[in-house]
Amino acid sequence: MKKVQDSKVIGTTWVEGVEVPVVQPEVYERIYCKNCDNEVDSDEQATGVCSNCGQPWAVHKAKDIQVKVVQLPMGAGSGE
């Protein structure tokens, strides 16, 4: 998986009378061939065909997105 967005504090908000940070999560992306599960790099994407099985991306390209919250403010739904 390739990281496509870093985590960072993008502002603050008030929750139950406490100012807490608003955190932009880390985002990871995996692009792969649905036919053979081969992960695709940017050079391979440009060809339009999977280098592992030879199938066209137009039909067999898949994308998985993973969102990671690396910081949860205390008191904001954390059970405190």
Image (cartoon, rainbow, N blue to C red):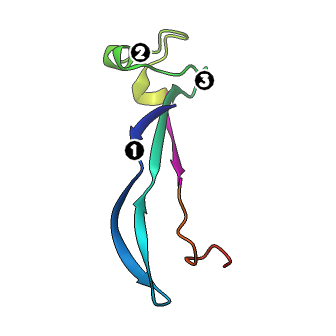
36 in the magenta segment? no
Residue shown at the point (46%, 47%) measured from the top left: 26
Badge nearest the viewer, 2 or 3? 3
Among the 4 quarters of the image, the one containing residue 56? top left
The x, y position of residue 24, in whole percent, is 40, 57
Residue position marked by numbered label 3 in the rendering: 37
Q: What is the three-letter code of the residue carrying label 2?
A: Val
Name the kind of residue labelled 1 in the image.
Answer: Asp
Kind of element beneath mark 1: loop
Is tag 2's residue or tag 1's residue first in the polypeptide sequence?
A: 1
- Confirm or deny contact between disc 2 and disc 3 (CB under 8 A): no
Q: Where is residue 31 in the image (x, y as percent from the top left)?
A: 47, 30
Residue 45 falls in which quadrant of the image? top left
Magenta residues, dominant SS class? strand
Task: State which region is magenta.
Answer: 61-70
Q: Which residue lies furthest to the right in this view?
A: 79
Image depth: mark 2 or mark 1 in front: 1
Name which of mark 3 and mark 1 comes first in the sequence.
1
Give the residue number, with chain letter if any, for mark 1: 6
Q: Where is residue 48 in the image (x, y as percent from the top left)?
A: 36, 18
Horizontally, residue 59 falls left or right of residue 52, namely left
For numbered disc 3, what is the local secondary structure? loop
* Image quadrant assignment for residue 43: top left
**Element type at mark 2:** loop
Q: How crowded is mark 3: few (under 14 residues within 10 Å), some or many (20 or more)?
A: some
Q: Which amino acid does label 3 sit on?
A: Asp
Residue 49's tag is 2
